[in-house]
Image (cartoon, rainbow, N blue to C red):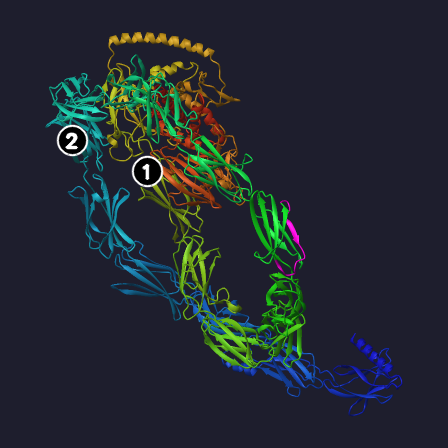
């Protein structure tokens, strides 16, 4: 393409030449167009203008012809000359000659040079030798050679370049010189690239390339650290580069054992798993670029010590045997040495295959040290162990008891040989009581029974062990203590004929007891008892006598005794009676003398359980009087017979004093006409009630019974003014006392009293309607301001009166009183006289809009005046009200010129009297008079606006000059016209105009002025005079009259800039200068002629100021290739800039244009360091201004600056590439981190590297290099860091199962800022720095896996996280290695439970840890270890047996990992209770102490009969057996036994039991043994189940077809003359108290008593019995017939549910029961309120049989509903109990959180009420993890009331978490803030108020009230019904008062039992208030459809019935009382026997 273009250009030029000169001949000119040179040829291309030319080429000097030229291609004038066989690189001089016409041209061309054929690179051997002699090895230089090039070469250019850094060296060698070159001081281990270029003249040959690598330098400081199985290798790297290290390990024979490749940064390595005692050769090879350099060293590993070295005595006293396992590796010999203090060493040398040796003749008990050294050459490794011979035994060992009876003393003689101490053990069977260590000198030891609890009489074994180190030798002996006497010997029972003693078991062991009864010194009775006896009874004793009872404890041949004194009781008195004799303050009592002996009587007078009198009377006394007693009080007299200080049984009688009369009777009518209230001071003493009677003179009107607590009453509907008699009677029992008073009711008032004035100002008339009832006369009073003016008495038959002479307008009060006796009843009314009129009414002043009226005040009382303004008899304004003291009024805002009428009225109350007057206002002036010239100089136009109001016409006057000038003309104008014109006026003249308003005779004027317009100026001009802020204006004087001229200067937008004025001077022309203008701005000048303030038409001219130059022109920035300039804009306005940049020689470099907003400019691509001149030209229109400045570029900085440590700790290498452009040199500085200078070097322009030695390890240095060129510099920076030193003193601390602390010391003399910590295995751990500084020598690691072995690697880091400028990358020290094992985690979920009474089972989950096994320990009472065992890691279930019943054990389980043991997991468990131990034969019902009648047996027993070691005794029952046998037998071991009814109805049954009764025996020691029970069998005793009559009656009502297999227990009369044997059965377990279900009972019986025979029945009794029996038979036949008839007529009701207990008994509902049935399921059972009591009695029959049946029907209600959401795994942890779950259909749903589908769950259910379907929410007690959900539910469900019916902790178990704040500080529950506002603590409940708000809506809050009932036991009911009923009523009252509230939340623990009871009770109480039926069954049924288990227990269901019954009873009792203040609820306690089943829960 280039050639074609060249040819075309030549042709064109030639053609032009031809055209230019067509007359001349064309020559063959030589025009050379192209030269093509090669290594051996040259081609010349030329073009000529001639035709048919012939060219040839010659050498310039030789003239020899070289070649001819040929035509080139198809062109006729282009030739090519090809010259061949030339010398390469040679400059040839040719001459081209035209053979045609001799034209010639000289040409010089050089052929291309030829590159050498190869490039050889070899290491520089001389330099290598010198380098090796310095200890570095390798070659630091290269030798380069090549063959000479063919042809001519001027020089060779050889380039050596570092391929890694790019650094290069250039060298030139003359072509005639030797073709070789050497490079020295190269970096070892570096790959270099070489380029050789041949140069001839200005031509170069293609380069010849080669690469070569310098050998790496060898390492230095090779160190080997040997151990038995490893070699530690460390070294220092040599200078230069390297790719890797290789560590070679060879054995003695040279075989390669290891070949390890390491990174180039590694400087140490450990070779492990080597053979001990072996010679190894270690070689460290440095590799780089395929070259190596090696250093080696030899070392021998340390020989290994023997293993398992043991020194054992094998039970020997004088020999030791040493054994071992031979050492690994090679061993030459073993050196064995046995040493001890006090004897010579025994040394032996053994061959390498020896494994044992025996040492004999040693001393017993002595410690020996065995040293075993393995020897290889000169190196030895020692293993040391210790051993000891067995010590000898002690001799002469004995143990005897001392005389104090509580100490055992042991003595002995010392053994032979050596020992360290003694260890003594005192054993109680297999249990160690004492385990103590004694020192060598001790020869005896005493065991104290007080501290050790030694049991007297028990045989103990003692051991003494002689201890020498871990060995011991044991000797044994035995001894015992004497037995102890019994404890707490007391007389537990005494009566007239018997004494019983009771004692506690003695301490220790014994065989039995001997009990002796003495009277004085005479033995009355003696008995021998077994060791289990604790009681003894002596019968048939003399009453009142004193006896001594001695109990002796026997054990072997030893005994001890204790005595007690007892006395029989005296007899009681009989026929005790009490009388009052009609007295209010005394009582008399009499009795008959007691039988037997007595000393005195003890008489007590008791009132309200308090002893009033406590007197003693002589033995002969038989009557006693009590004085000064309380009237009406009921007293109890107790008389006791006293003998020798002992009292008989008490005789009791009651009596009452006569009640006292009431006092201070007050009767008041309270100002009422039909009412009397009576109150009195209560009568002294006690009264039951009061009877109040009210009567008039004729009859008794009312009689009221009043409670004693309310000493007052009221009587209503009485006759007004009547006198009544009131009688008040105090009643106490059957006695009364009376008080009578009189009082009158208030008379009634008159009706409708009225006072009228009859339009007179001094008169009032009063009249009324007669009063009702009784009265005497009327009294009428008239007053004013409480001052009575007139008083008139009027007869009762009249009803009016008149008052005269009163003040006008005055308001009077008229009082009409009715009098009856002393009582007066008044009624009042108001009356007002008529007011008077004002006087002297006149019009005082008038204006255009106001009138003033005056007057004199009216006589009399005036409330106010009223002024009314009228126009045409119509009101203009609302009336004006003025005070009574005002005498004038100004009427404003009137219409000007109008005639008005003014009325003034006097007001007094509603009455008024008026006067009037007329008046006119002044007309108003015209407004807005406008005098206008309309731009005319000879006319004026006048216009105005009419004034307000009325006007008749106007008058307009024109005046010359001001207002005082003469009048020129006046014109009348109609009132509808408002403008007028005047013409032919003088220009510029001032005129005045007056306009007059006319209305009636009144006038009003207004005046204005106006002027004509002056003439305009001519010849106006404006010029800037070449300034930037001035314009000069000139003009010609205006024609006509003028005051002066006004000049305005406007900008180009027409805005006024400035104005000026100039008076008219008459000179020509006029001029003005405007200064201080804006530069470069265009202005317009406007000139007006003025005359009297009137301006002529303006004349204009335009001009522009010159623009200002820019200011502050400066260099903003400069670099090596750019300049930036900045300036401040010029003042004023301008259109833009012209920017010029000139070179230093003033030639233009660049030109640019700028906008006015341009304030800076940059020029790029400039030469570094060159000067430039910048010119800024400002333009504004055609005006300009300029400013200039000089500037220079800066030199360039170096590139590729690096600072490297090259793994050295004290050196840095700084290198760079040369700066572009011209420079003088470099200044290189090195700075410390604190900015201080470490070193500075000045370098020449060719320097590219520098080394800084002796630096601080690990320090980050800052290298700065300045490029200097003239006065300017440029800098480049880099950072480099030396390697740090490693840390020291590495150790572990605070090791737990998941964490530890690693500590170390930082390296000294080194900079560092962090440490690198690595570990294996690579678990994900959390590393914490406790000191929050990276340089601290401590790190806490968390998240370690328990029980795991970890290996840690620690390195020092300098420059952690990188450094500044990229040169501060992290540097690491050599690593430090450490290992540690964590403790294992404790086991999880340990749970122990009893298996039976002697074993427990424990299970657990394995810990999250590495562990080997478990250790299991069992402790009794948390301190005595009873079991310890180790088991494998796979066991998670373990059984512990051979324990004691009913004992608390603590089980501890630990996990073991190697030597580390976890924390113990503990659980406490109590073994199951067992049946009580069998009492001894002597512990049974005493036949001699029992009191037997014909139908009853009275006996006593106490809790001490049964031991509580197997559990506390909970219940008793009495077993009665009809038998005459006297054998030592127990009752039949069957439960339960038949009942009394079975025994009576079935003659084959000979044994029965009574009902169960609670034991009340405590479980711990104390007075439980003295708790006594007095049983009266056969009397229908409540404790034994009560009488059987009601049960028999119920049995008779049963269907005879129904089989009865449920027998309630009762207590019926015994058979006369029948032998009975009695036993007491004690239960430690009768049923499960928690779940209310019967479990297999645990019981034990006493032995049956000896036969007790009841007395025979008298004959008369038999006859009576036969008669009664016949009557009963007849009655039974009649009742049976009646029942059969009723049974046939009975309709079968719908059968419900399956049979769940026994055969169901269905009865037809009574008239009060209405069944609701759904299908086959009863859903409701409403009971009429009036029949509820009888219904409840029927439910209670047969031990609540029907009630149990009804509750059983509710068992499965609602159970078939799904529970899917509650059973989700994510929600199981939110449930407190896994069997109490909400149904899916009724559960409360929370709002979702983060789209979590399970976040809406809470264990809560909607429960319906009587009013709404979601009236309640029943929920569980919140868990710690669900408290936030609970409050969220309260917030979202708009809950205002929360009911809590549980305690947080009950019986030690957590029932509910404390989910509210403890104090008034707000707490966060999720996103909600809860704050307690108040807390009211009541005896049985607490009310708290909380403020709750959302964190997102702090301005919106809600008050939530919590009702916390605190006395309700779990699974049970409160003790009374009153408390809960009041609580439910209180909650319901708050709910009803909370408007807009959502559901009420109720919860207990599970949210079903107590919660269901509360909700059910609330519903049925509402039913009682609103309906005539109550449906408990239906309410519970409805609740269970919505939440399972609601009303959880049968006792709670029965309690609901009790509550309803008690409420109805209280209502009935209230209806019987006429006092409305009588309490609604009465605390009716349930019958204890009837409700016993429920009260026990």
Residue 493 relative to residue 266: left or right:
left
Q: Which residues are magenta?
A: 975-990
User: What is the quadrant of residue 1964 in the picture?
Assistant: top left
- In the rendered image, residue 968 lying in the magenta stretch gets the answer no
Q: Position of residue 32 (x, y in %)?
A: 79, 83
- The residue depicted at 39 percent of the width and 10 percent of the height is 1679
Q: Residue furthest bottom?
A: 62
Give me the C-alpha separation between circle 2 and circle 1.
35 Å
Would you place residue 2020 above or below residue 974 in this image? above
Q: Residue furthest right?
A: 23
Q: Are marks 2 and 1 in contact (CB under 8 Å)?
A: no
Q: Position of residue 1064 (x, y in %)?
A: 61, 68
Label 2 element class: strand
Q: N-terminal of the two: label 2 or label 1?
A: 2
Q: Which residue is mark 1?
A: 1447
Label 1 element class: loop
Q: Residues within 10 Å of mark 2 (few under 14, many from 20)?
A: some
The label on residue 564 is: 2
Where's the N terminus, which quadrant? bottom right
- The residue depicted at 45 percent of the width and 27 percent of the height is 1980
- The residue depicted at 20 percent of the width and 51 percent of the height is 395
Q: Residue furthest left?
A: 521
Q: Is residue 1289 visible?
A: yes
């Amino acid at each position: 393409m280039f050639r074609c273009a060249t040819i075309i250009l030549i042709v064109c030029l030639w053609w032009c030449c031809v055209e230019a000169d067509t007359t001349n001949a064309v020559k063959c000119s030589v025009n050379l167009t192209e030269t093509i040179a090669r290594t051996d040829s040259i081609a010349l291309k030329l073009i000529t203008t001639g035709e048919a030319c012939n060219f040839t080429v010659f050498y310039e000097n030789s003239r020899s012809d070289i070649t001819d030229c040929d035509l080139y291609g198809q062109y006729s004038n282009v030739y090519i000359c090809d010259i061949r066989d030339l010398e390469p690189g040679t400059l040839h001089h040719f001459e081209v000659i035209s053979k045609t016409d001799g034209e010639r041209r000289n040409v010089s061309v050089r052929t291309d040079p030829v590159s050498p054929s190869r490039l050889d690179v070899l290491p520089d051997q001389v330099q290598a030798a010198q380098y090796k002699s310095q200890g570095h090895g390798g070659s630091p230089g290269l030798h380069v050679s090549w063959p000479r090039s063919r042809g001519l070469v001027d020089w060779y250019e050889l380039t050596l370049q570092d391929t890694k850094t790019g650094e290069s060296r250039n060298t030139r060698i003359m072509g005639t010189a030797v073709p070789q070159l050497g490079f020295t001081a190269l970096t070892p281990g570096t790959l270099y690239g070489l380029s050789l270029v041949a140069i001839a003249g200005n031509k170069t040959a293609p380069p010849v390339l080669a690469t070569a690598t310098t050998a790496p330098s060898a390492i230095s400081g090779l160190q080997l650290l040997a151990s038995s199985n490893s070699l530690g290798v460390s070294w220092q790297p040599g200078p230069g580069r390297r790719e890797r290290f290789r560590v070679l390990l060879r054995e003695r024979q040279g075989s390669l054992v290891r070949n390890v490749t390491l990174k180039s940064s590694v400087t140490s390595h450990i070779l492990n798993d080597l053979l001990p005692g072996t010679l190894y050769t270690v070689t460290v090879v440095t590799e780089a670029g395929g070259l190596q350099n090696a250093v080696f060293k030899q070392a021998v590993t340390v020989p290994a010590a023997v293993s398992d070295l043991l020194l054992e005595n094998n039970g020997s006293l004088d020999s030791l045997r040493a054994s071992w396992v031979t050492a690994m590796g090679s061993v030459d010999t073993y050196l064995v040495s046995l040493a001890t203090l006090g004897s010579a060493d025994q040394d032996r040398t053994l061959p390498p295959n020896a494994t044992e040796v025996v040492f004999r003749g040693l001393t017993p008990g002595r410690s020996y040290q065995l040293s075993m050294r393995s020897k290889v050459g000169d190196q030895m490794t020692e293993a040391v162990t210790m051993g000891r011979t067995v010590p000898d035994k002690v001799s002469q060992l004995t143990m005897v008891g001392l005389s104090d009876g509580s100490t055992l003393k042991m003595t002995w003689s010392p053994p032979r040989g050596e020992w360290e101490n003694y260890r003594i053990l005192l054993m109680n069977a297999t249990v160690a009581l004492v385990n103590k260590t004694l020192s060598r000198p001790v020869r005896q030891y005493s065991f104290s029974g007080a501290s050790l609890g030694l049991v007297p009489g028990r045989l103990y074994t003692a051991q003494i062990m002689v201890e020498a180190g871990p060995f011991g030798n044991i000797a044994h002996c035995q001894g015992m203590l004497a037995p102890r006497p019994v404890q707490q010997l007391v007389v537990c029972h005494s009566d007239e004929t018997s004494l019983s003693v009771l004692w506690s078991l003695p301490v220790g062991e014994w065989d039995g007891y001997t009990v002796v009864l003495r009277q004085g010194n005479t033995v009355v009775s003696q008995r021998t008892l077994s060791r289990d006896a604790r009681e003894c009874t002596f019968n048939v004793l003399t009453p009142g006598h004193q006896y001594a009872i001695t109990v002796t404890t026997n054990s072997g041949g030893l005994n001890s005794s204790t005595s007690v004194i007892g006395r029989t009781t005296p007899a009681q008195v009989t026929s005790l009676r009490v009388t009052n004799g009609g007295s209010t303050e005394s009582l008399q009592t009499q009795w008959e003398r007691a039988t037997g002996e007595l000393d005195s009587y003890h008489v007590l007078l008791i009132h309200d359980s308090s002893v009033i009198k406590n007197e003693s009377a002589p033995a002969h006394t038989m009557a006693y009087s009590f004085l000064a007693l309380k009237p009406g009080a009921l007293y109890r007299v107790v008389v006791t017979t006293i003998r020798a200080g002992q009292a008989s049984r008490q005789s009791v009688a009651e009596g009452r004093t006569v009640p006292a009369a009431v006092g201070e009777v007050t009767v008041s009518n309270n100002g009422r006409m039909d009412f009397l209230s009576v109150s009195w001071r209560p009568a002294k003493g006690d009264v039951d009630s009061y009877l109040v009677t009210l009567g008039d003179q004729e009859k008794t009107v009312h009689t009221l019974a009043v409670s004693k607590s309310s000493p007052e009453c009221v009587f209503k509907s009485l006759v007004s003014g009547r006198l009544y008699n009131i009688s008040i009677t105090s009643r106490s029992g059957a006695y009364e006392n009376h008080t009578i008073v009189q009082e009158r009711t208030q008379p009634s008032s008159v009706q409708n009293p009225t006072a009228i004035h009859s339009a007179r100002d001094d008169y009032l008339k009063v009249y009324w309607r007669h009063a009702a009832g009784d009265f005497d006369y009327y009294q009428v009073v008239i007053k004013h301001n409480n001052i009575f003016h007139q008083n008139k008495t009027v007869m009762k038959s009249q009803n009016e009166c008149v008052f005269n002479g009163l003040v006008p307008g005055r308001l009077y009060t008229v009082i009409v009183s009715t009098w009856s006796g002393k009582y007066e009843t008044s009624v009042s009314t108001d009356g007002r006289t008529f007011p008077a009129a004002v006087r002297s009414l006149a019009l005082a002043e008038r204006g255009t809009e106001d009138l003033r009226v005056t007057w004199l005040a009216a006589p009399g009382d005036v409330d106010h005046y009223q002024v009314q303004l009228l126009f045409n008899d119509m009101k203009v304004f609302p009336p004006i009200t003025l005070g009574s003291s005002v005498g004038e009024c100004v009427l404003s805002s009137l219409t000007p010129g109008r005639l008005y009428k003014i009325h003034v009225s006097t007001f007094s109350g509603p009455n008024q009297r008026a006067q009037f007057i007329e008046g006119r206002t002044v007309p108003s002036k015209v407004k807005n008079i406008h005098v206008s010239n309309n731009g005319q100089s000879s006319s004026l136009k006048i216009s105005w606006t009419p004034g307000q109001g009325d006007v008749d016409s106007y008058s307009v006057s024109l005046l010359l000059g001001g207002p005082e000038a003469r009048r020129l003309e006046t014109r009348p104008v109609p009132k509808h016209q408002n403008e007028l014109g005047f013409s032919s006026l003088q220009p510029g003249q001032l005129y005045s105009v007056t306009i007059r308003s006319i209305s009636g005779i009144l006038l009003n004027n207004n005046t204005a002025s106006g002027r004509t317009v002056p003439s305009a100026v001519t010849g106006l001009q404006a010029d800037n005079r070449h300034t930037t802020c001035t314009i000069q204006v000139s003009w010609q004087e205006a024609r006509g009259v003028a005051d002066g001229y006004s000049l305005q200067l406007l900008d180009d937008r027409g805005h006024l800039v400035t104005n000026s004025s100039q008076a008219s001077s008459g000179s020509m022309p006029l001029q003005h200068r405007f200064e201080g203008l804006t530069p470069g701005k265009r202005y317009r000048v406007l000139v007006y002629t003025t005359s009297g303030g009137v301006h002529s038409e303006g004349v204009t001219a335009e001009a522009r100021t010159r623009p200002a130059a820019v200011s502050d022109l400066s260099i903003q920035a400069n670099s090596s290739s750019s300049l930036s300039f900045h300036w401040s804009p010029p003042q004023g306005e301008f259109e833009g800039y012209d920017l010029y940049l000139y070179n230093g020689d003033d030639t233009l470099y660049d030109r640019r244009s700028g906008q006015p907003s341009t304030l800076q400019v940059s020029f790029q691509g400039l030469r570094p360091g060159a000067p430039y001149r910048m010119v800024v030209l400002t333009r504004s229109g055609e005006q300009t201004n300029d400013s200039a400045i000089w500037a220079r570029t800066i030199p360039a900085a170096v590139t590729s600056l690096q600072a490297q440590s090259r793994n050295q700790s004290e050196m840095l290498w700084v290198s760079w590439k040369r700066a572009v452009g011209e420079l003088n040199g470099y200044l290189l500085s090195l700075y410390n981190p604190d900015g201080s200078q470490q070193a500075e070097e000045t370098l020449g322009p060719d320097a590219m590297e520098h080394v800084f030695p002796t630096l601080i390890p690990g320090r980050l240095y800052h290298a700065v290099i300045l490029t200097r060129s003239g006065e300017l510099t440029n800098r480049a920076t880099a950072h480099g860091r030396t390697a740090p030193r490693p840390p020291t003193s590495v150790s572990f601390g605070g090791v737990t199962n998941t964490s530890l602390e690693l500590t170390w010391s930082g390296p000294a003399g080194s900079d560092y800022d962090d440490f690198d910590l690595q570990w294996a295995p690579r678990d994900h751990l959390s590393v914490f720095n406790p000191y929050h500084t990276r340089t601290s020598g401590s790190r806490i690691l968390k998240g370690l896996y328990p029980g795991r072995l970890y290996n840690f690697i620690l390195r020092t880091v300098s420059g952690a996280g990188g450094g500044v400028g990229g040169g501060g990358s992290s540097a690491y020290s050599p690593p430090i290695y450490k290992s540690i094992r964590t403790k294992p985690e404790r086991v999880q979920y340990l749970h122990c439970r009893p298996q039976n009474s002697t074993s427990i089972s424990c299970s657990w989950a394995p810990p999250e840890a590495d562990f080997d096994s478990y250790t299991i320990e069992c402790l009794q009472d948390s301190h005595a270890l009873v079991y310890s065992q180790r088991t494998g890691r796979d066991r998670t279930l373990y059984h512990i047996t051979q324990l004691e019943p009913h004992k608390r054990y603590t089980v501890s389980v630990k996990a073991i990992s190697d030597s580390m043991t976890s924390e113990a997991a503990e659980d406490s468990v109590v073994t199951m209770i067992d049946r009580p131990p069998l009492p001894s034969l002597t512990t049974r019902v005493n036949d001699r102490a029992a009191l037997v009648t014909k139908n009853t047996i009275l006996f006593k027993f106490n809790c001490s009969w049964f031991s509580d070691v197997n559990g506390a005794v909970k219940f008793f029952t009495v077993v009665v057996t009809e038998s005459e046998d006297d054998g030592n037998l127990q009752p039949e071991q069957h439960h339960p036994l038949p009942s009394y009814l079975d025994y009576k109805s079935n003659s084959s049954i000979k044994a029965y039991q009574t009902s169960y009764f609670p034991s009340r025996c405590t479980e711990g020691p104390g007075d439980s043994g003295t708790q006594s029970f007095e049983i009266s069998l056969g009397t229908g005793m409540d404790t034994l189940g009560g009488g059987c009559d009601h049960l028999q009656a119920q049995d008779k009502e049963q269907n005879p077809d129904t089989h009865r297999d449920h027998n309630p227990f009762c207590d019926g009369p015994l058979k006369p003359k029948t032998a009975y044997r009695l036993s007491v059965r004690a239960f430690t377990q009768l049923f499960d108290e928690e779940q209310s279900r019967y479990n297999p009972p645990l019981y034990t019986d006493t032995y049956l008593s000896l036969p007790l025979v009841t007395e025979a029945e008298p004959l008369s009794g038999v006859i009576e019995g036969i008669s009664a029996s016949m009557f009963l038979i007849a009655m039974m036949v009649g009742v049976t017939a009646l029942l059969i008839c009723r049974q046939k007529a009975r309709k079968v009701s719908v059968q419900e549910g399956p049979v769940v207990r026994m055969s169901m008994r269905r009865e037809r509902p009574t008239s009060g029961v209405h069944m609701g049935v759904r299908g086959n399921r009863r859903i409701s059972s409403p009971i009429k309120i009036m029949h509820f009591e009888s219904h409840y009695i029927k439910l209670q029959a047969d031990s609540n049989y029907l009630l149990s049946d009804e509750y059983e029907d509710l068992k499965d209600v609602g159970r078939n509903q799904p529970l899917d959401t509650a059973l989700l795994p994510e929600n199981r942890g939110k449930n407190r109990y896994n069997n109490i779950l909400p149904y899916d259909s009724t559960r409360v749903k929370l709002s979702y959180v983060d789209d979590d589908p399970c976040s809406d769950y809470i264990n809560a259910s909607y429960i319906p009420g009587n009013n709404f379907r979601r009236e309640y929410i029943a929920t569980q007690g919140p868990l710690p993890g669900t408290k936030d959900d609970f409050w969220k539910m309260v917030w979202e469900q708009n809950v205002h009331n929360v009911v809590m019916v549980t305690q947080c902790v009950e019986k030690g178990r957590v029932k509910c978490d404390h989910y509210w704040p403890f104090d008034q500080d707000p707490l966060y529950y999720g996103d909600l803030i809860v704050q307690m506002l108040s807390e009211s603590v009541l005896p049985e409940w607490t009310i708290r108020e909380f403020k709750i708000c959302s964190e997102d809506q702090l301005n919106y809050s809600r008050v939530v009230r919590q009702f916390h009932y605190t006395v309700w036991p779990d699974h049970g009911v409160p003790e009374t019904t009153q408390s809960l009923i009041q609580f439910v009523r209180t909650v319901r009252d708050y709910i009803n008062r909370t408007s807009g509230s959502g559901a009420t939340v109720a919860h207990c623990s599970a949210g079903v039992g107590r919660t269901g009871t509360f909700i059910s009770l609330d519903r049925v109480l509402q039913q009682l208030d609103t309906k005539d039926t109550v449906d408990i069954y239906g309410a519970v049924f409805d609740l269970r459809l919505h939440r399972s288990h609601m009303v959880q227990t049968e006792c709670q269901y029965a309690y609901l019935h009790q509550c309803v019954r008690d409420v109805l009873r209280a209502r009935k009792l209230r209806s019987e009382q006429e006092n409305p203040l009588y309490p609604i609820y009465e605390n009716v306690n349930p019958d204890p026997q009837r409700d016993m089943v429920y009260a026990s829960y």
